[in-house]
Image (tube, rainbow, N blue to C red):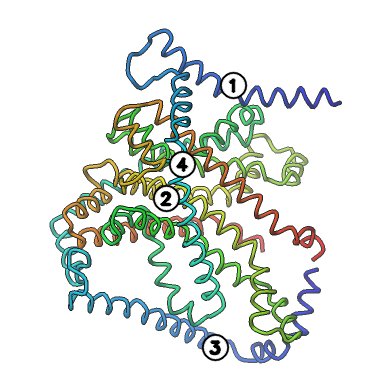
Amino acid sequence: MNTTAARLRAALAPAAREPDKARPRRARRLRLERATLVRFALSWPFPLALLLTWYLASAFEWLPPQILPPPAMVVSTFVELVQSGELGDNLWISLWRVLVGFAAGGAAGLALGIAMGLSPRIRDYLYPSFRLVAQVPSVGWLPLLMMLVGIGEALKIILIAKAAGMPIAMNTYKGLEGVSTRFIEVARVYRFTRWQLLTKVVLPAAFPQIWNGIRYGLTHAWLALVAVELLASSEGLGFLIVYGRQLYQLDVVMAAVAVVGAFGYALDKLLALIEARLLRWRRDGF
Amino acid sequence: MTTVVTTLELRRILRGATLPALLLAWWWAMFHFHWTDTVMFVPIAKVWDTAVRMSSSGQLWISLGASLARDLAGFTLGSLVGLAAGTALGLSRLLENLVGPSLHTVKQVSLFAWIPLISVWFGLGDTAKVVFLSLAAFFPVLLNTFEGIRSVPRELIEVARSFAFTRSQMLLRVVLPAALPSIFTGIHLALIYAWLATLGAEYLLTSGIGIGNLLTDGREHLWMDQVLLGVAVVGLVGFALNLVAGAIERHLLRWRGGSAGQY
């Protein structure tokens, strides 16, 4: 089937492929670099036009500054917030909450997922309840949790842990369940012990999906953090946003929103880097 | 043979029900034996009474209707815009290079962080909520439509070219149908995110009615029965939305049946 597709492709586009191969490598690399440059250059006009519109809109006061602060003001507020340490303090608190909640939820999610994936009995006992809890999004649990544990630090950690733990448990369980029986049979033939079977076969085979769950978990943790800090907090990035909103200081709001975006991105990139490092072994096979 | 299967299945069902049953029993005992006197542990019967009372007074249905109407309006708007934008970006490399990076940057901002800005620009009413919901639905549809169109097999396009399809034929008969499974993934995700965002919007933009307001009210007055009812309704709606999305997807993708095996 693949060969048919390949033959078809080769028959249909011989002219496009041949010169590519004939050309020396360096020329191709140069062209690739030029393409990247062009792409980079093309990515700027749109945001710059947007920025210009924003600048003009506030310079001519098409909209009052309480509704649309000038870009320069947002930048200077950002610098002020950094220099006064206000931004750093709140950012640190938010990051700490995500870290603790994610670690707790991740550990619990992994344990639950592994237990359900390895033991059919545990799966029978826990999976239906797990599905029941998963039907309600984390934000839906928030009022109930607020009543049960108050609006202190525990609320934030529990909510973030729950948001992070659910996708991790689900993906771990599904990943383990989906490990091909062929791998396990081969391992049996080699008389692997149960521990070897687990650490050398099952976990590595399920790893990509488990890792997917971990990345989802982090995204959800960050989402839950912002939600809970907007609703019930007196410190943290979410609080900074609410605070700026209440005083109608949209420059503070925008600066804080930009930081939320930047750190969400950085956390995700960090996990992508770790993944590339952890999955190096996969390439050796090919 | 059949009896073996049924006893096995019965055992599974019993095992699955153990944990919820234990929880309910504990909850009941908490109240019945006066282990606690906080207002948190309302008897289970009271939750049911509240459900009956609120549904016969219509309050529950009005709230649910308001939430669902909002949810659907935002979801429809967001996914239509997402579908159009994703198709445009998928078809044109130039457009992708121009606005793609900006969109990816904006996407990084955690969803709920938009609410304070939206509340300044659009107020606290339904307009603001629908704008926020459509933002929640927009990104999953955009990304999955784009991915779906970009991964349409080149062979399909070439066959269509050799049949001299016009541009609209190419789009409607080849590109979009081939991208449909991925687009549905995006729509399904958008449905989930829009429901999540509905709750968030109702908590934070407090004017009006809805299931989120029902939950917030219950919490403020320490009415545990109302909060529990709200959580149950939220779960049921999420479950129903999932079922409907799955059914529509299966129905619309019927024509694909078995083709993967023949390819």
Three-letter code, disc 3: Arg
Q: Chain of mark 2?
A: B
**In the figure, is residue A138 to the left or right of A8?**
left
Mark 1, secondary structure of its residue: helix
C-alpha gap between disc 1 and disc 3: 67 Å
x then y, percent, for residue B161: 71, 84
Question: Answer yes or no: do the residues labelled 2 and 3 have beta carbons within 8 Å?
Answer: no
Please name the residue that numbered disc 3 is placed on.
A26
Q: Residue at x 53, y 38 (%)?
A: B236
In this view, which residue lies farthest toward the front? B57
Three-letter code, disc 2: Ala
C-alpha gap between disc 2 and disc 1: 33 Å
Mark 2, secondary structure of its residue: helix
Mark 2 against mark 3, which lies toward the viewer? Answer: 2
Please name the residue that numbered disc 1 is placed on.
B18
**In the figure, is residue A91 to the left or right of B47?**
left
x then y, percent, for residue A53: 28, 78
Mark 2 against mark 1, which lies toward the viewer? Answer: 2
Mark 3, secondary structure of its residue: helix
x then y, percent, for residue B137: 47, 58
